[in-house]
């Protein structure tokens, strides 16, 4: 079977949905880890509190991976029965991946900044951890909305 441009575009969308939020999450988790390491050096008992904040920017990578799996399932690559997608269908799949790809990348970094500020809260007032989590979780809202948009578009496409 010859590979079509539509199949290539759909797989490119899946790849972008996975790697862009993955890059953002890796960068974000690293940024918060750097901030947390300084706090834990001074007070090792704050490790668990700062670890919670460090994990938050990692969710965008999970959302991107989930979207990539949905694309692979929808186009048949996971079952070994790749659909013969037209260029138009491939472009639609690619477009459906854009919300989580772009918002996932940018929101992971923005969330990391908020979470790193939360690490600063924990450094001075560890009893206020929930406030730091809340600031970072506000950014999460937009990653979840992007995930929802991408998934709804993907399930709304008629590919077969």
Image (tube, rainbow, N blue to C red):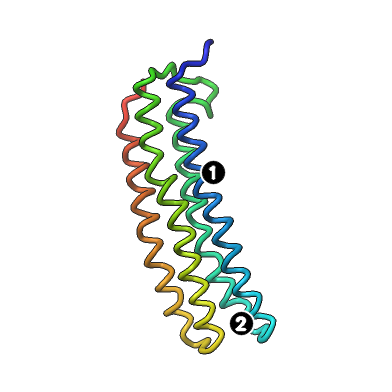
Residue 124 x, y percent position in the rendering: 53, 89
Q: Is residue 63 left or right of residue 52?
A: left
Q: Camera-side residue: 49 or 35?
A: 35
Check residue 46 in the rendering and tell me which mark sits there, or answer none: 2
Secondary structure under tag 1 reads helix
Q: Is residue 130 above or below residue 125?
A: above
Q: CA distance from mark 1 to mark 2?
A: 32 Å
Q: Is residue 1 above or below residue 26?
A: above
Residue 114 x, y percent position in the rendering: 46, 70
Q: Is residue 29 left or right of residue 110?
A: right
* Residue at image point 49% right, 29% down: 11
* Residue at image point 52% right, 54% down: 24
* Residue at image point 67% right, 86% down: 42
Q: Looking at the image, do the residues carrying marks 1 and 2 touch, with CB atoms under 8 Å apart?
A: no
Q: Quadrant of residue 39?
A: bottom right
Check residue 19 in the rendering and tell me which mark sits there, or answer none: 1
Secondary structure under tag 2 reads helix
Check residue 76 in the rendering and tell me which mark sits there, or answer none: none
Q: Is residue 74 left or right of residue 33?
A: left
Residue 105 x, y percent position in the rendering: 47, 51
Earlier sequence position, callout 1 versus callout 2: 1
Q: Quadrant of residue 131?
A: bottom left
């Amino acid at each position: 079977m010859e590979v079509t441009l539509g199949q290539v575009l759909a797989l490119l969308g899946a790849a972008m949905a996975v790697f862009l939020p993955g890059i953002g999450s890796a960068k974000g988790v690293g940024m918060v880890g750097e901030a947390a390491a300084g706090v834990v050096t001074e007070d090792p008992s704050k490790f668990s509190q700062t670890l919670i904040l460090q994990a938050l920017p990692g969710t965008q990578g999970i959302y991107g991976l989930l979207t990539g799996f949905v694309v692979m399932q929808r186009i048949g690559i996971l079952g070994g029965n790749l659909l013969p997608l037209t260029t138009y269908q491939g472009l639609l799949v690619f477009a459906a991946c854009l919300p989580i790809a772009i918002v996932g990348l940018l929101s992971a970094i923005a969330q990391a900044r908020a979470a790193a500020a939360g690490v600063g809260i924990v450094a001075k007032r560890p009893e206020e951890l929930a406030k730091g989590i809340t600031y970072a979780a506000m950014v999460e809202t937009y990653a979840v909305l992007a995930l929802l948009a991408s998934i709804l578009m993907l399930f709304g496409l008629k590919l077969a």
